[in-house]
Amino acid sequence: MANKNPNTEPLLRSIEDKKQKTKQKVEYTIKEMIKQKEKINFNSVSAKSGVSKPFLYKYSDIRSRIETLRMQEEKLDTPKQVKRNMTEQSKDVIIASLRKKIKHLEDENKKLREQLRVDWAAIYNEFN
């Protein structure tokens, strides 16, 4: 005969323990990803922690944490954006430096051409 009042308490406790351990695993993974400055989204957290994406979406505390971190990362400037946002002053400094270098190279080129002309004249006079 079947037990009409089964004791499900141990089973429910086991399920709750497993859920808590999985949440801790996800939390640890997120902290590590933040330390290593990795991109945080549902796919990356799922892959790194070994937890399914439905689990991450199911629990609102985990879901909101991942969404918040993802939004924060989107607001940060990428290296490409930082490069694009150079100030006019820094651009002017770079331009001035390059102009100075060009002037120096042009002067050197002029001296070398003059020296070459003198050397060719000496070689020409030597054979004549």
Image: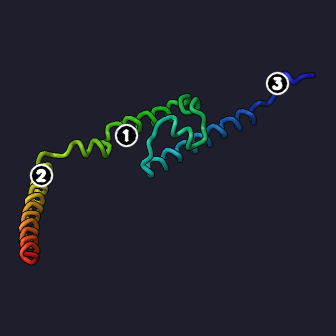
Q: Which residue is mark 2?
A: 95
Say few, some or many: other residues with alpha carbon within 10 Å of mark 3 (under 14 / 14 to 19 / 20 or more). few
First of labels 1, 3 by sequence position: 3
Q: How many marks?
A: 3
- Which residue is farthest bottom? 126
Residue 80 in the image: x percent, y percent?
Answer: 30, 43
Disc 1 secondary structure class = helix
Q: CA distance from mark 2 to mark 3?
A: 84 Å
Residue at 82% x, 27% y is 6
First of labels 2, 3 by sequence position: 3
Residue 32 in the image: x percent, y percent?
Answer: 49, 50
Q: Which mark is residue 5?
A: 3
- Residue toward you, 125 or 3: 125
Horizontally, is 52 left or right of 62 in the view?
right
- Residue toward you, 32 or 61: 32
Q: Which residue is mark 1?
A: 73
First of labels 1, 2 by sequence position: 1
Q: Amino acid at mark 1?
A: Glu
